[in-house]
């Protein structure tokens, strides 16, 4: 591996003062360059696999590999725990930068061998260009952060170049962070419900409660705008209680309207499961609303399950003992941690949308899903596939005998009134006009 000699690495903590000093020393006003912030998004997970002590060695290896891919004069800062700041001079336009950025992104395909373990890292990159994006150095630096913030929201490894639309979104994000404090007091959290369909019967067998924030200025916001924020600040505990209460009232109403066997799925956060009063709260609400436990499913993300402590596992056991089923949401996204399948009490899995998306076009995805479903069935676990958008995807899932499905093909998340209209009029509640293949009718 040859690395251009003039690719320097600096290793000091960030402060505006340091940054100013650095820029003035090395970058001349007339220069044009790219500022990139590189986030190793799974560094925490890698440290966990490597038992922390190899974390710095891994980071060192990553820096070396980045230098190799840049392969021209550049400065690399270690910038906080899992972020590197790259300054690549002589970048006149976006096309120049794209070539180098794409090379850096190929680090995602590299395997790092450490402590006898094979590690893959996942990086996200935010890029801004000086003076192309702004003549003020500090603004360009801030823009790289905004671009990284956008890249971080992407599902897989990604890079983003700054654009002005991002700046407006960023302003919105900051307003959201301030306004969220009042959302609970102002009763702004509401629930939408997405139908879940059984393809064998052709009927809606359940609905998933999905939180929405009815923001006074921006209207209905999906969880991507706020769920991480309320997870971090702990508000999710209180919001989760409201969600469960509203979901119980709704399922009671649906049962009273004649949809007797309908099941309500509710998403839980790890913070709720760690709450000492959670189980008592659930029991109280079920008693007040007179909902039987067999009509409630809880969904916890695969990430929650792999991080579950004894306390969380014990809460899950109490839930299961009550007769509520537990599903692992986003199943398959943390596939290397399958050992939880025997150590954590669960009843089913929800195959992640990323597998369903494109299942009809990729032989490999189809094979993976077939095996995931067989694995789950062999373990006596129920299976739901989520994110079904097309009839071709549905046909593939029918081929692998996946009967319970959820996705925009059947219905998007709906407000309570629209849900009732959907239940009254939906073709999925009738055998006629069904889109399911003849053999399934
Ligand atoms: P999830 O539990 O995996 O929910 C499914 C998400 O996928 C929903 O997004 C739904 O709108 C979306 N989806 C379903 N079918 C399709 C499809 O065919 N195509 C596409 N493109 N998307 C589809 P939503 O409502 O934005 O929720 C996102 C996530 O937020 C949820 O993912 C869940 O992890 C979390 N969440 C939602 N409500 C709650 C809650 O009350 N508590 C907690 N802790 N988390 C929640
Ligand atoms: Mg879910
Ligand atoms: Mg999911």
Image: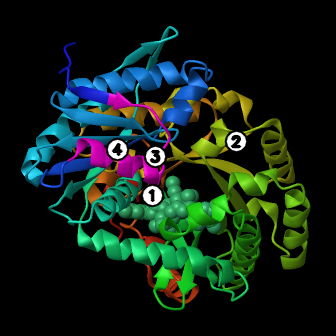
Is disc 2 placed on a helix, strand or loop? loop
The correct choice, above or below, for 212 with respect to 320 in the image is below
Residue at 72 percent across and 62 percent down: it is 234
> Callout 1: few (<14), some (14-19), or many (20+) C-alpha neighbours within 10 Å?
many
Q: Which mark is residue 83?
A: none
The magenta stretch spans residue 10: yes
Mark found first going from the N terminus, 1 or 4:
4
Question: Which image quarter is the C terminus in?
Answer: bottom left
Distance Cα–Cα, label 1 vs label 2: 23 Å
Q: How is the image coloured?
A: rainbow
Residue ID for mark 4: 22
Q: Looking at the image, is mark 1 or mark 4 nearer the viewer?
A: 4
Residue ID for mark 2: 346
Q: Is residue 52 left or right of residue 148?
A: right
Distance Cα–Cα, label 2 vs label 3: 18 Å
Residue extent of the magenta highlight: 9-27
> Callout 2: few (<14), some (14-19), or many (20+) C-alpha neighbours within 10 Å?
many
Residue at 43 percent across and 46 percent down: it is 18
Question: Which image quarter is the N terminus in?
Answer: top left
Distance Cα–Cα, label 1 vs label 3: 8 Å
């Amino acid at each position: 591996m040859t690395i251009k000699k003039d690719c320097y690495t600096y290793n000091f903590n960030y402060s505006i003062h340091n940054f100013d000093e650095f820029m003035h020393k090395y970058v001349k006003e007339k220069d044009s360059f790219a500022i990139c912030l590189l986030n190793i998004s799974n560094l925490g997970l890698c440290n966990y696999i490597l038992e922390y002590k190899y974390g710095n060695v891994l980071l060192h290896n990553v820096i070396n590999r980045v230098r190799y891919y840049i392969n021209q004069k550049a400065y690399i800062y270690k910038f906080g725990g899992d972020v590197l700041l790259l300054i690549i001079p002589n970048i006149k336009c976006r096309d120049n930068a794209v070539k180098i950025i794409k090379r850096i992104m190929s680090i995602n395909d590299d395997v790092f061998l450490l402590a006898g373990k094979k590690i893959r890292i996942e990086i996200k990159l935010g890029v801004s260009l000086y003076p192309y994006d702004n003549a003020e150095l500090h603004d360009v630096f801030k823009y790289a952060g905004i671009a990284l913030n956008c890249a971080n929201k992407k599902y897989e490894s990604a890079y983003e170049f700054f654009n002005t639309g991002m700046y407006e979104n960023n302003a919105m994000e900051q307003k959201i962070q301030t306004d969220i404090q009042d959302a609970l007091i102002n009763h702004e959290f509401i629930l939408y419900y997405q139908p879940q369909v059984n393809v064998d019967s052709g009927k809606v067998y359940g609905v998933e409660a999905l939180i929405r924030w009815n923001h006074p200025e921006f209207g209905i916001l999906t969880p991507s705008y706020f769920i991480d924020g309320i997870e971090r600040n702990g508000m999710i505990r209180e919001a989760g209680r409201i969600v469960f209460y509203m979901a119980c009232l709704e399922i009671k109403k649906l049962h009273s309207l004649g949809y007797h066997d309908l099941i309500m799925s509710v998403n839980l956060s790890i913070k709720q499961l760690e709450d000492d009063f959670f189980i008592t709260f659930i029991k109280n609400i079920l008693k007040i609303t007179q909902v039987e436990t067999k009509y409630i499913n809880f969904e916890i993300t695969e990430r929650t399950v792999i991080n579950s402590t004894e306390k969380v596992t014990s809460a899950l056991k109490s839930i299961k003992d009550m007769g509520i089923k537990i599903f692992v949401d986003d199943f398959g996204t943390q596939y290397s941690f399958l050992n939880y399948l025997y150590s954590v009490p669960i009843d089913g899995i929800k195959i992640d949308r990323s597998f369903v998306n494109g299942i009809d076009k990729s032989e490999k995805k189809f094979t993976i899903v077939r095996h995931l479903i067989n694995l789950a069935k062999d373990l006596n676990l129920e299976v739901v596939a989520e994110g079904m958008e097309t009839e071709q995807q549905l046909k593939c899932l029918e081929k692998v005998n996946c009967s319970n499905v959820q996705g925009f093909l059947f219905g998007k998340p709906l407000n309570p009134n629209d849900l009732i209209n959907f239940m009254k009029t939906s073709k999925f509640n009738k055998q006629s006009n069904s889109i399911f293949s003849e053999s399934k009718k």
